[in-house]
Image (tube, rainbow, N blue to C red):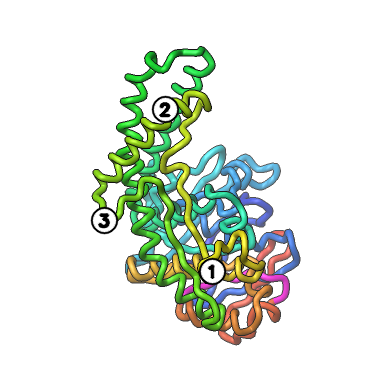
């Protein structure tokens, strides 16, 4: 997976440009708020995912512009390919000259892994970010999973609307039982697919993340991951998990009616992240939390390479300068031979690598 050329026009503060990075390590340096992260974000959108900064599409259009256009020439699947993204209120996408129905249809075509300081929220914040991490990573491996997520959330929205209406209008439970039966069956089946996918992904990610964390910590500590779901059935089939979700949904009906929303389901699962048996969110130091997130991200990249048989593009946003030399060396050795993009304020603080291609970014202008 290699970015050959990126064209930008009207995207955030970046000046119109045609940018050709190197095939190995690329260092993007400059002061804060000059456009370094914007450049990574422009490349990242071609994975089909949302902005890794949580921005809406319209927020990525440059000030005073009515739209933005991005073009990417890249090598994937053993051949050169081209994609284009036009952003106004939403993204419009073409791949090799063919218009795609939605941006997420790029998932699995161009694969990347990004790490930025904002990803510490994987540890520090609530379970929503951890679910989003697992779902986004799995979508790159299995693009069809996007449809499962969409079906689940549509059904969840409809069930919540029914519960909210019943609470506001004081409808007795007997008056909504039939509709709840319909939504519960659909939600249980879709939820079972999601739960199983997440469990399978974490089982594959666990040994890879543990190995990376061991390397980062000098084998002094052990990282462990586990997917926590009340519907987990040891050795169970998808039908077993769906049956368990259905039981839980029916048991929670009275509570859901009182709350006006669905209180149990795949939308409330979580990932347990522990170091030496203790939750890293509660007991981990800042350094341990950062290393745990790095381990997750590098393991995600390794799993992508294992499944697709080619390494993803690695985007490291303002990360290397905060690590000591041994950790920098470990990360770069781990992704040796990959195309890597590293942002920093001073290139000397990020990496002493004579093979790297270095770019300066100042007020949105990219120069070599």
- SS label for mark 3: loop
Marks 1/2: CA–CA distance:
37 Å
Q: Secondary structure at mark 2?
A: helix
Answer whether residue 342 is magenta in the image: yes
Question: Residue drawn at (53%, 63%), measured in percent from left and top?
Answer: 114
> Left or right of 69: which side holds 239?
left
Can you give x and y, in whole percent of width and height, for residue 233 in the image?
31, 50
Give the residues in magenta: 338-346
The residue beneath circle 1 is 275
- Label 3: few (<14), some or many (≥20) within 10 Å? few
Where in the figure is residue 52, as x and y percent of width and height? 56, 54
- Image: 77 above or below 348: above
Q: Quadrant of the N terminus?
A: bottom left
Residue 183 among those drawn in magenta? no
Say which residue appears at 30% left-offset and 39% top-offset: 189
Q: CA distance from mark 3 to mark 2?
A: 28 Å
Residue 184, image x, y percentages: 34, 31
Residue 97 shows up from this direction: yes
Give whichever of discs 1 and 2 has the lower sequence position.
2
Q: Which residue is mark 3?
A: 235
Q: Residues within 10 Å of mark 1 (few under 14, many from 20)?
A: many
Closer to us: 357 or 195: 195
Q: Is residue 20 visible?
A: no
| Residue at x-position 52% and y-position 49% | 50
**217 vs 339, nearest the viewer:** 217
Tell me if 146 is positioned left or right of 168 in this view. left
Image mark for residue 135: none
According to the image, label 2 marks what residue? 253
């Amino acid at each position: 997976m290699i970015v050959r050329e990126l064209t930008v026009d009207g995207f955030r503060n970046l000046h119109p440009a045609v940018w050709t990075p190197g095939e190995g390590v690329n260092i993007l340096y400059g002061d804060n708020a000059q456009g370094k992260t914007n450049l990574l974000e422009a490349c990242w959108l071609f994975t089909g995912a949302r902005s890794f900064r949580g921005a809406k599409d319209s927020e990525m259009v440059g000030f005073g512009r009515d739209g933005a256009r991005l073009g990417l020439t890249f090598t994937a699947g053993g051949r050169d390919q081209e994609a284009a993204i036009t952003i106004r209120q939403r993204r419009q996408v073409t791949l090799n000259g063919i218009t795609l129905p939605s941006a997420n249809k790029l998932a699995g075509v161009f694969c990347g892994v990004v790490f930025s300081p904002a990803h510490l929220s994987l540890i520090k914040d609530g379970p929503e970010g951890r679910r989003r991490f697992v779902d986004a990573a799995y979508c790159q491996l299995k693009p069809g999973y996007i449809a499962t997520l969409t079906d689940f959330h549509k059904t969840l929205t409809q069930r919540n609307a029914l519960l909210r209406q019943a609470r506001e209008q004081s409808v007795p439970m007997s008056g909504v039982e039939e509709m709840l039966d319909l939504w519960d069956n659909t939600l249980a089946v879709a939820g079972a697919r999601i739960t199983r996918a997440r469990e399978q992904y974490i089982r594959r990610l666990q040994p890879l993340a543990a190995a990376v964390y061991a390397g980062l910590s000098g084998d002094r500590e052990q990282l462990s991951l586990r997917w926590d779901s009340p519907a987990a059935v040891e050795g169970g089939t998808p039908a077993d998990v769906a049956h368990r979700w259905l039981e839980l949904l029916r048991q929670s009906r009275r509570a859901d009616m009182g709350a006006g929303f669905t209180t149990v389901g795949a939308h409330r699962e979580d990932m347990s992240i522990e170091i030496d048996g203790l939750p890293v969110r509660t007991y981990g130091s800042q350094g341990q939390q950062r290393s745990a997130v790095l381990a997750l991200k590098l393991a995600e990249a390794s799993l992508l390479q294992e499944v697709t048989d080619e390494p993803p593009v690695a985007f490291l946003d303002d990360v290397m300068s905060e690590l000591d030399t041994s950790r920098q060396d470990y990360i770069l050795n781990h992704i040796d031979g990959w195309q890597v993009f590293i942002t920093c304020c001073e290139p000397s603080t990020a990496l002493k690598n004579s093979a790297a291609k270095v770019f300066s970014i100042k007020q949105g202008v990219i120069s070599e």
